Image (cartoon, rainbow, N blue to C red):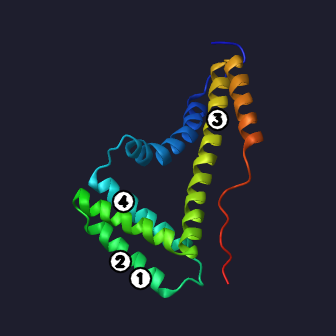
Amino acid sequence: MRAGVNTHSTENVEEAHLGFLKAQIILDKRESQKYNGFMTPREWKNFAIDLIDGLERQLCSSAPKTARLQLAELRECASKATTVKARKSCEQRLDKLVESTPFFRAAARRHVGERADIAIDGIERSLEGMIKLARVRGDKKAERRIAKILADFRKNRRKPIYKPIKKR
């Protein structure tokens, strides 16, 4: 046993890994497979429906009712798409829809901004957890390096990307 090291550190180690795991859950499951060019049909369907639901949540109240109907049609298209060709067609329809009107573009920006803020917060919690882990292990050099990385990260971080819409 080293002097100054907490011997009941199992909880601290688990807590240190928690922030890292949350960031990994957000990024790893969908993003890494997407970047590798591989996404199973089930993952694609879940991703597309989640994206459509997020757009619908971020639509402002002044958006026309046809906008929600268009999203419902896209949701149905995404849930029925079984072939690569059908998924590609659904993606193209979604891209066209988002690019077609300002309220869809704004909703997409808000949705992506919200997701980015969640991922950035996860990274920050992960770095904090890594500092705790280094402290528990008694590795002062690693603790200082990670603390410097976190300080630089916080210094360079801009204001949050996500700005919620005001309900009327």
- N-terminal of the pair, mark 2 or mark 4, is 4
Q: What residue type is labelled 4?
A: Asn
Left or right side of 140 for 107:
left
Label for residue 73? 2
Instruction: Indicate whether 35 appears above or below 109.
Output: above
Q: Do the residues labelled 2 and 3 touch (CB within 8 Å)?
A: no
- Percent from the top left, x then y, of residue 157? 72, 45
Query: Mark 3 and mark 1: span between their CA atoms?
Result: 42 Å
Name the mark nearer the viewer: 2 or 4.
2
Q: How far apart are marks 1 and 4 (CA)?
A: 20 Å
Question: Which residue type carries mark 3?
Answer: Leu
| Mark 4 lies on residue | 46
Categorize mark 1 by other alpha carbons within 10 Å: few (<14), some (14-19), many (20+): few
Tell me if 92 is positioned left or right of 105 in this view: left
Left or right of residue 21, residue 39 in this image: left
Which residue is identified by label 3?
127
Camera-nearest label, 1 or 4: 1
The x and y percentages for residue 72 are: 38, 77
Label 2 neighbour load within 10 Å: few <14, some 14-19, many 20+: few
> Is mark 1 in CB contact (under 8 Å) with mark 2?
yes
Q: What amino acid is labelled 1 in the image?
A: Leu
Q: What residue do we see at 45% from left, 42% from top? A: 28
Mark 4 surroundings: few (<14), some (14-19) or many (≥20) residues within 10 A: some
- Numbered disc 3: secondary structure: helix
